[in-house]
Image: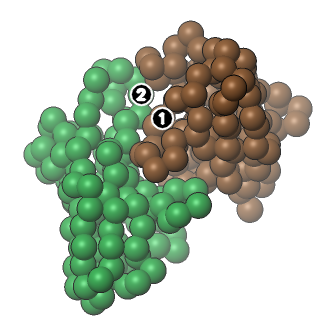
Amino acid sequence: SYVLTQPPSVSVAPGQTARITCGGNNIGSKSVHWYQQKPGQAPVLVVYDDSDRPSGIPERFSGSNSGNTATLTISRVEAGDEADYYCQVWDSSSDSYVFGTGTKVTVL
Amino acid sequence: QVQLVQSGAEVKKPGASVKVSCKASGYTFTSYDINWVRQATGQGLEWMGWMNPNSGNTGYAQKFQGRVTMTRNTSISTAYMELSSLRSEDTAVYYCATSHDYNALDYWGQGTLVTVSS
């Protein structure tokens, strides 16, 4: 089955840039979605189709995808960005969604 | 506005079944697939499967095949996820979600905690 690997944690100072990677075999050929999840809450879609932002999501959130790595970038990080982040793709070989392992972003 | 409202928390014994409901409002229920995702405490998100509310067609993650059943009642815009042969490892929050505006899961239910304990 298709595996998506994320770093367990990323720490960043307020105002700096956080980059969260999502590694998968030839992930650049797939559409990647990113979700933010705060404690006790349902996930929220922050980026879809590699780099598009849903309405209401700040421009500080951006995404890219190429080769074997997709990246979610959070610019000008704020305390409210502290959360778990998950990448997701549709794996056509198994006809199933796959989530990444998740990354906890800590704002120092 | 699009809303998915799930049923309340459940406590089940090992070997039993649980059926979680997800009531949709604010859109045409039969127009968008419903997905189910679960999350054990302190763990990541795990996709369980999808259902087309119009046709009733389903697709399940291999891990859950034979143990999960997704159904719907279109007259009350409600989707259901039933998981059988419960074990302690099934203790988790179960979410329903749909792709309404975008090609991703953009609307989620509030989650339903299912606890499996003897």
Residue B87's image quarter?
Answer: top right
The residue lying toward the viewer, choosing from B81 and B24, is B81
Whether residue B112 is visible to the viewer of this picture, yes or no, is yes
Disc 1 secondary structure class: strand
> What residue is drawn where x is 52% and y is 47%?
B41
Q: Position of residue A10 (x, y in %)?
A: 24, 67
What residue did someone put label 1 on?
B47
Mark 2: secondary structure: strand
Q: Nearer the viewer, residue B116 or A58?
A: B116
Which marked residue is nearer to the observer: mark 2 or mark 1? 1
The picture quadrant where one finds residue B117 is top right
Query: Hey, which quadrant is residue B22 in on the image?
Result: top right
Please identify which colour was used for chain A in the image.
green
Residue with the mark numbered 2: A96
Location of residue B56 with respect to B5 vertically, above or below: above
Chain B in the picture: what colour?
brown
Mark 1: amino acid = Trp
- Which quarter of the image is occupied by the C terminus of chain B? top right
Q: Are the residues at dot 2 and dot 1 in contact (C-beta closer than 8 Å)?
A: yes
* Circle 1 Cα neighbour tier, 10 Å, few/some/many (<14 / 14–19 / ≥20): many
| Residue B65 picture location, percent across and down | 52, 14
